């Protein structure tokens, strides 16, 4: 019984982990599609995926397009 329960717990955690990765990939694609011009205009000197890029986008938040701000907000960036 313990073995079955442990197997179910591992399967559950694995499913949750993969769901999070899938969500992150989806958000990344949405952000790239909606923020491409903003990235080029404001932060193109920062490496994609870096903390420097994240800081730049936060600093330029008021200058970003509405679609980019919406995509960032939906992905959990504040």
Image (cartoon, rainbow, N blue to C red):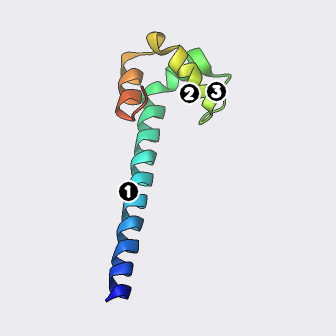
Write the residue at 43% across / 30% down: 77
Q: Nearer the viewer, residue 26 or 9?
A: 9
Q: Give the labeled residue for mark 3.
A: 52
Q: CA distance from mark 1 to mark 3?
A: 27 Å
Q: Give the labeled residue for mark 1.
A: 19
Q: CA distance from mark 1 to mark 2?
A: 23 Å
Q: Is residue 10 above or below residue 51?
A: below
Q: In this rendering, would 48 be left or right of 75? A: right
In this view, the residue farthest toward the top is 63
- Of helix, strand and loop, which one carries label 3? helix
In this view, the residue farthest toward the bottom is 1
Q: State the image quarter where residue 56 is shown.
A: top right
Q: Position of residue 49 (x, y in %)?
A: 59, 36
The answer to which of marks 1 and 2 sits earlier in the sequence is 1
Q: In this rendering, would 24 be left or right of 4? A: right
**Badge 3 density bin: few <14, some 14–19, many ≥20, Cα 10 Å:** some
Q: Give the labeled residue for mark 2.
A: 54
Q: Is residue 73 above or below residue 16?
A: above
**Would you say the residues marked 1 and 3 are in contact, meaning their CB atoms lie under 8 Å apart?**
no
Write the residue at 37% across / 28% down: 73
Q: Quadrant of the C terminus?
A: top left
Q: Position of residue 36 (x, y in %)?
A: 51, 26
Q: Position of residue 72 (x, y in %)?
A: 41, 28
Q: Quadrant of the N terminus?
A: bottom left
The answer to which of marks 1 and 3 sits earlier in the sequence is 1
Write the residue at 33% across / 81% down: 5
**Would you say the residues marked 3 and 2 are in contact, meaning their CB atoms lie under 8 Å apart?**
yes
């Amino acid at each position: 019984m313990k073995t079955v329960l442990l197997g179910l717990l591992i399967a559950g955690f694995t499913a949750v982990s993969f769901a999070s990765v899938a969500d992150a990939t989806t958000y990344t694609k949405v952000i790239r599609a909606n923020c491409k011009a903003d990235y080029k205009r404001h932060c193109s000197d920062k490496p994609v995926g870096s903390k420097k890029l994240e800081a730049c986008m936060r600093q330029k938040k008021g200058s970003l397009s509405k679609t980019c701000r919406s995509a960032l907000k939906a992905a959990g960036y504040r």
